Image (spheres, coloured by chain):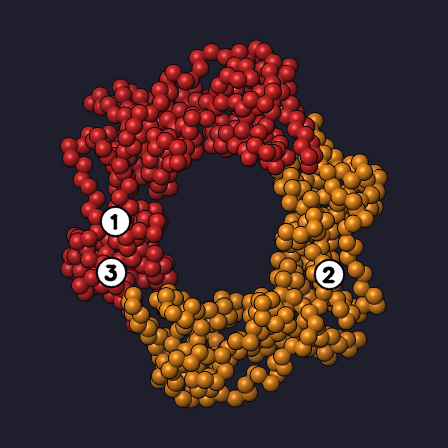
Chain colours: A orange, B red
Amino acid sequence: MKVHCSKDSLLTGVNTVQKAVSSKNTLPILQSISLKAEGQKLIFTATDLEIGIRCEVPAQTEIEGTVVLPAKLFTDIVRKLPDTTISLSSQEESIHLFYYNSEILLKGYDQDEFPLLPDLLDPTIFSLPTNLFRKMIHETVFACGSEENRPVFSGLLLEIDHQNLRLIATDTHRLAYRLAEIPNPDEIKFSGIIPSKTMSEIYRLLKEDDETLAIRFNDAQVSFQFGSVHLISRLIEGQFPNYKQVIPQTCETKVYLSVRDFMESVERASLLARDSSAGASIVRLSIKDNIIHLDHTTEIGRIAEQIYMEKEGNDLNISFNSKFILDVLRVIDAEEILFELSGPQGAAVIRNIQDRNYIYLLLPVRTY
Amino acid sequence: MKVHCSKDSLLTGVNTVQKAVSSKNTLPILQSISLKAEGQKLIFTATDLEIGIRCEVPAQTEIEGTVVLPAKLFTDIVRKLPDTTISLSSQEESIHLFYYNSEILLKGYDQDEFPLLPDLLDPTIFSLPTNLFRKMIHETVFACGSEENRPVFSGLLLEIDHQNLRLIATDTHRLAYRLAEIPNPDEIKFSGIIPSKTMSEIYRLLKEDDETLAIRFNDAQVSFQFGSVHLISRLIEGQFPNYKQVIPQTCETKVYLSVRDFMESVERASLLARDSSAGASIVRLSIKDNIIHLDHTTEIGRIAEQIYMEKEGNDLNISFNSKFILDVLRVIDAEEILFELSGPQGAAVIRNIQDRNYIYLLLPVRTY
């Protein structure tokens, strides 16, 4: 391999694939990046066997070939390279980098040991606008659970049927649901659970000027292609909960209130509630007439917040884990929300008033 | 105490004094902030007994008084307050904060237990421009040692005599020296060792538009006053090394080279050298004709950098801890430096070519 490439392009390559490098103390080959010179491009690949990322950058190739390099050290070196054209030349498993009158030799690994990113056999392809998908991820991914409880909750359910594209995440205490309507002339159908890490990576890597995103999938894997990036991920096996069943269709109380007022009050209340024995910080809402009272007394002090709102239906007292409220208020693309409640023990729903395709469901905590 | 104060002013107060709050797990009273309403101002004070900071912000006082509050919680609450006028009202050891229709009550501590910042008895006062002092700290403080070796090395020597103001720091492996010439009509003399934490705090708190800094001192303490901030610190007892003796007056080799080229080459070389058994990352310079070669071979690879330079005197090979070179290159206010060397084992000196009042001395490492 012999290739010439700008420092910026090398940096794009290593930065794009870095999150697919295994961070666990594992085989060196999974903590490495593969560089392949082919045609007028240099192809960066990394995988931890759960997720794989490939990225192409422009380069002048003299001799095609592949090297596999230790990811962290190579990335650190690329960051410190001067802002000029870098020549890369392989020698068995090693690479030479040349710039100005200086050079670096870095020992690599046997390229045959580097795991190939699987090609999806007989994939179905679906395209959609990237900005839409990025927004959908942002509004849902935070509601995923961690791997420790059941694996299905550490992923997001992606569903395509007819004109409907849905993304749903839940950790069993709350659920975020986003629906978008998109053209689907081929009547493609898909339903799969995608690891939250994969979705967070897509969110991070998608750029405003990437116009479309192509999703390819089969029964076990899904891949996303946008710009010069190709990301492939396993699907999580298992049965995702039936979200249609859990979203309440009616409610006893409707509250219309400002996102900012609500968020700031809950943030302050949670500061005083955080030392409580429960571990989580619980906020109690007392919804009465046109005011929500947040009133907390702990050993360190007391907070009494009032938030003005419009209300339809019954007064009630209800408590929530403050994190479950703040998480959604920080990402929702609205100035006002509709908060639907069904008594102190019923599931509550937060809706975007301007956009009925977004639903956030959260379970109250029993304190009253 | 009853006082009205903007959220921004409260924020300035808590942010200014926060580094004087004890971070160790110690008496609650040392992890607190004192607030005193007096005249048309609110005075914030914190101290860990090594350093004390006082800061005044404008306020409308109705009833004068003092409260002592848990620093972390009060700071977190202030950060989350709405951007409006906050009314503070004390009730025994507690404080009520009122804003809009909401309120917070926070329990505090007995104000009599809060340590008073000492008033310097019979201090001598010296004034100097803040921008100059800030630059002097920046160029020297990094060379301090940690508290673990001898205490004198964890501080900076401040010397005033005739028209000379000097700041010197050393950890015994390197020494940073900065001289400034300033008016001293009263022929004030001072020599004291100031903790590096104190100096870092002054650097952090000094603002461009604070014009002068007043230094007050006696045998045991020093205080710095600028803007609305008053910072008081103990002096470190002990004998600072005689810096005049250690700075070489002659050299065998003079090297003129670009700060940027030198820094970038050493940064790259240190990446490959960092896995070495020495713990520190050692760079070897081979100075020959008009090129410095940095050449390293380790188990992970090899780097061969060349830096062009102008040289007077002997060729030589010499090794340094790369951190000791990078630290000074990152702060020196120059594009080119003069590197003075006296053989592979003699102390080396880095000078700012444009400003002969700055000297950085560093000891080589024996590897050749």
- Residue found 72% across the figure and 43% down from its top: A69
Give the residue at mark 2. A232
Give the residue at mark 1. B45
Q: Position of residue A18 (x, y in %)?
A: 65, 51
State the CA–CA distance, disc 3 to disc 1: 14 Å
Q: Quadrant of residue B91?
A: bottom left
Give the residue at mark 3. B108
Q: Quadrant of the C terminus of chain B?
A: top right
Q: Is residue A268 visible?
A: no
Q: Residues within 10 Å of mark 3 (few under 14, many from 20)?
A: many
Q: Helix, strand, or loop for circle 2?
A: strand
Judging from the image, mark 2 belongs to the subunit labelled: A
Q: Helix, strand, or loop for circle 3?
A: loop
Q: Residues within 10 Å of mark 1 (few under 14, many from 20)?
A: many
State the CA–CA distance, disc 3 to disc 2: 55 Å
Residue B143 or residue B90, whichever sits in front: B143
